[in-house]
Image (tube, rainbow, N blue to C red):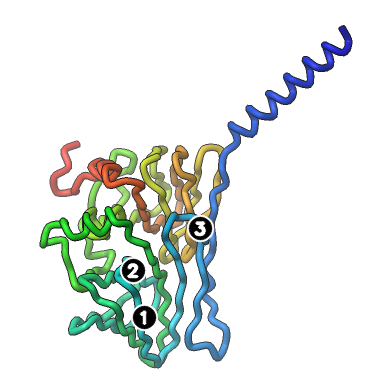
Amino acid sequence: MKTSSIISKLLVAICAVVVLCCNSSPDIVVQNLNMNIPEGKQVFSEDLLIDEIAETKIEHFAFVGPTNQTVNFTQENVTMFLFLKGNAVIKADTIVKTVNPESIAIPMDNLNKVEINVPNGETLHFVKFTKTLSSQDKSDLASFPSENKYKLFYTRFIDCEPYTEKIKSPNTTSRTVLPADIVPRVSLGTVEAMGPDEVGAHKHPMLDQLFLGLTDNDITVFADDASVQLKEFALLHIPIGSSHWVKVEENKRMNYMWMDFFLTKEGQEWLKTHKPSSTDKK
């Protein structure tokens, strides 16, 4: 009896450990960008959140002016530039754009390089995403409507269309930076508010999501039972399928970019929860 009792207790203990492990919240992975460039360096780069997003390489670059840099890429990938700090000029074929902080550029239409000119006295910081295109992505890209096709997609975040969402307060300004069906299975947007404010709890198991802290961002991100601070110029991975929400305290600023990497094309139906501000019927 004693032996069977001991075995029973051990089995109960083992089951308890298994349940505890299964119920434990996944970690929220966050990485701060190194914004302090070593003296004497004109080009600096670092990898970010290695292997966190499938088939996507993420890098932080800094170009110290005066410099003219050429960035090459292939048609097997789509490359997105998120400019965070500093001013520059980007040239893609015959298109020339002045680059400002908090803007995005995506070379398309079979372009294989861009030139970035940073003037004297400027240091340009940007995050570069290189996403491998599947055969389905390439087919979808070819079938997108003509108004969604660009040689160089460029916009400032502040110029993008605002939208509303039930999980956000009227004090929150949200903008769609990269709508669906420009880059296959990728969409980007921004969220901004002064505290106190919050983004309500929600789940989206159909996508992998990153948060990028923009200028002066100072928020707490929660995912299930885990929480972490997200400051400016830091990149965070939301555990896929987790219930997550955001809180900003009084006199602090919420200013971050969300980046949705959909597992399938059908998953983009989630974006229908975003209602353009001009047509929202609350």
Q: Which residue type does callout 3 highlight?
A: Asp
Residue located farthest toward the left when viewing the structure as drawn: 146
Percent of width and height locating residue 177: 27, 60
Q: Give the residue number, with chain letter if any, for mark 3.
A: 51
- Alpha-carbon span between mark 3 and mark 2: 17 Å
Please name whichever residue, 95 or 145, is drawn nearer the observer in this view of the structure: 145
Please name whichever residue, 54 or 120, is drawn nearer the observer in this view of the structure: 54
Q: How many marks?
A: 3
Q: Indicate which disc, 1 or 3, sits on the residue closer to the N terminus.
A: 3
Whether pointer 1 and pointer 3 mark residues with C-beta atoms closer than 8 Å, the reply is: no
Q: Which residue type does callout 2 highlight?
A: Thr
Q: Indicate which disc, 3 or 2, sits on the residue closer to the N terminus.
A: 3
- Alpha-carbon span between mark 1 and mark 3: 22 Å
Secondary element under disc 3, as helix, strand or loop, is: loop
Q: Relative to residue 106, is residue 14 depicted above or below? A: above
Please name whichever residue, 245 or 57, is drawn nearer the observer in this view of the structure: 57
Whether pointer 1 and pointer 2 mark residues with C-beta atoms closer than 8 Å, the reply is: yes
Q: Give the residue number, with chain letter if any, for mark 1.
A: 71
- Alpha-carbon span between mark 1 and mark 2: 10 Å
Percent of width and height locating residue 67: 39, 91
The numbered disc on residue 79 is 2
**Crowd rating for badge 2 (residues with CA inside 10 Å; few <14, some 14–19, many 20+):** many
**Crowd rating for badge 1 (residues with CA inside 10 Å; few <14, some 14–19, many 20+):** few
Percent of width and height locating residue 109: 20, 71
Q: Which residue type does callout 1 highlight?
A: Val
